[in-house]
Image: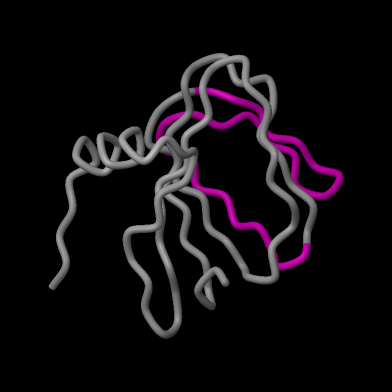
Amino acid sequence: MKSFRLDELEAERRANDGAYLQFIRERNMSVGLYALNAGSGDPQQPHRQDEVYVVMSGRASLTVGSETTQVARGSVVHVAAGTPHKFHHISEDLRVLVVFSPPEA
C-alpha cells in the first residue's frame, strides 16, 4: 500500500520548485499533483495518455477541445489522449490530482 497526505505532497512540490509532482508511477498509470496559482497561465500541451483531473482546491475555467467548463473543488474531468486542453481564468490557486493512463512518459 502507498499512502500520501496532500499537505506533504504540496510541500514536496514547492520544495522542488515545480508546478507538477508525480508521486505514483505504476505499469498502467501515474498520479501527480498539479499546481497553478491564481492569475497564472497553463503551459501544458496535449498528452499521449488519457487523463483524469480531480480538483482538490481552487477555481478556474478548463477548456478541453472546443468545450469550456468551470472547475472548483470536487470537479472531476476526463481528457482523452491527444486532446488540446488548458486551465485558464484561474481565480483561486488551483491544486489538481492528475491520473494518467498509461503512465506519463
Is 102 left, or right, of 5 in this rendering? right
Q: Which residue sits furthest front? A: 16
Q: Residue at x 26, y 43 (%)?
A: 9
Q: Quadrant of the C terminus?
A: bottom right
Magenta region, main secondary structure: strand
Q: Residue at x 27, y 41 (%)?
A: 12
Residue 59 in percent (x, y) is at 52, 23
Residue 37 in percent (x, y) is at 51, 22
Q: Nearer the viewer, residue 18 or 101?
A: 18
> Is the residue 2 above or below the residue 53 in the image?
below
Q: Nearer the viewer, residue 74 or 16?
A: 16
- Decide whether residue 75 is among the magenta residues: yes
User: What is the span of residues highlighted in magenta in the rendered image?
Assistant: 59-82
Residue 79 in percent (x, y) is at 66, 58
Q: How many marks?
A: 0
Asked which colour scheme the image uses, the reply is: one colour
Q: Nearer the viewer, residue 75 or 14?
A: 14
Q: Residue at x 53, y 57 (%)?
A: 52
- Decide whether residue 105 is among the magenta residues: no
> Is the residue 64 above or below the residue 2 in the image?
above
> Is the residue 10 above or below the residue 22 in the image?
above
Is 63 left, or right, of 90 in this rendering? right
Is 101 left, or right, of 7 in this rendering? right
Q: Quadrant of the N terminus?
A: bottom left
Is 31 left, or right, of 88 in this rendering? left
Q: Which residue sits furthest right? A: 66
